[in-house]
Image (cartoon, helix red, strand yellow):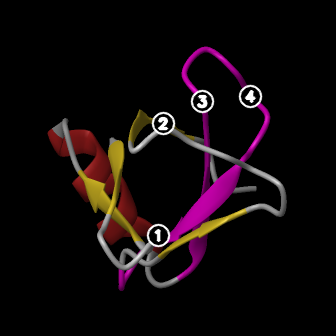
Amino acid sequence: MRLIKQEDGAWAAHFTVLWEVTYLAEVEGCWVPFALPRTDDPIGGIHAHTHAIRLHSGVELSTRQVVTLLPNA
């Protein structure tokens, strides 16, 4: 998925493949971690139901950052 920074500074998720939406629907209401492409270190999470985004402290991203969902532990 791609994270897009809104004018108010909040982040919105733009889903790029169908499996992302399907996976979030299956995990029902928990926070799912995501990472930069080709890494396994979580930099934040997306809420499976609301699609709210939260970044870990100190994480800085570009305005249109590609990220990858990680398995929910």
Q: Secondary structure at mark 3?
A: loop
Q: How far apart are labels 4 and 3 at the CA level?
A: 8 Å
Amino acid residing under circle 1: Val
Q: Earlier in the sequence, mark 2 or mark 1?
A: 1
Task: Kindly report the distance in space between the C-alpha atoms of the residues bearing marks 2 and 1.
Answer: 18 Å
What is the x, y in percent for residue 70?
60, 42
Residue at point 76%, 56% (across, down): 73
Where is residue 23 shown, x and y percent of the image? Answer: 36, 54
Determine whether label 4 and label 2 are within 8 Å by CB.
Answer: no
How far apart, in angstroms, are the residues tagged by discs 3 and 1? Answer: 21 Å
Element on which disc 2 rests: loop
Whether residue 39 is in magenta: the answer is yes
| Above-or-below relation of 32 to 30 | above
| Image quarter of residue 45 | bottom right
**What distance separates the C-alpha of mark 1 from that of mark 4?**
19 Å
Q: Which residue is mark 4?
A: 40
* Marker disc for residue 36: 3
Q: Amino acid at mark 4?
A: Asp
Disc 1, SS: helix
